[in-house]
Amino acid sequence: MPVWQKYSGKPSGTKLLAKSWTTLDLTLPDPPVSGSEDHFLYARVVFTWDPAKKGQMARVECRYLRENGDETAYKELHFEYGTTSVPFDQKHWEEGTRGQGGKWQMKVTGGVLRAVASTRYSKIRVIT
């Protein structure tokens, strides 16, 4: 089985995650082949908590947004107030179409003042 795969690399610095969908600064080419696509995202999320919202959890949402607007690979996790850093990963498999890529997006709501993705990277593999 032929396999096409790419790795985004790890951007330097951090990426501020907002309360609305934030596109992560990860670059992967659109697949040049159609087939079974495996997508993987890793992001270390670091929280700064809002003392006025003590006790509220952080809600971290993630999705893979296709270029055609299709929202896939949705995941939501909740983290206890006071948690400082979490490893967040997301895996997704689907039948993909040659030339149609997408982008990973995240948002964080709840008891946080600020959330950033520090280490982050993505991988894609297509089995034709």
Image (tube, grey):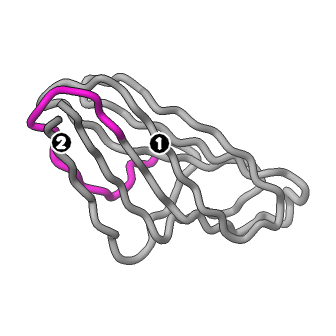
Residue for point 85% across, 66% down: 51
Disc 1 marks which amino acid?
Answer: Lys
Q: On screen, 93 above or below 46?
A: above
For disc 1, the neighbor class at 10 Å (few under 14, some 14 to 19, many from 20) is some
Q: Quarter of the image containing the C terminus?
A: top left
Q: Would residue 102 appear left or right of 14 to someone viewing this image?
A: left
Q: What segment is highlighted magenta in the picture?
A: 22-38
The quadrant holding residue 97 is top left
State how far apart marks 1 and 2 are (Cα).
Answer: 18 Å
Mark 1 lies on a secondary structure that is: strand
Front position in the image: 21 or 74: 74
Front position in the image: 38 or 60: 38
Q: Quarter of the image containing the N terminus?
A: top left
Disc 2 marks which amino acid?
Answer: Val
For disc 2, the neighbor class at 10 Å (few under 14, some 14 to 19, many from 20) is few
Q: Mark 2 — residue?
A: 3
Q: Would residue 93 appear left or right of 46 to someone viewing this image?
A: left
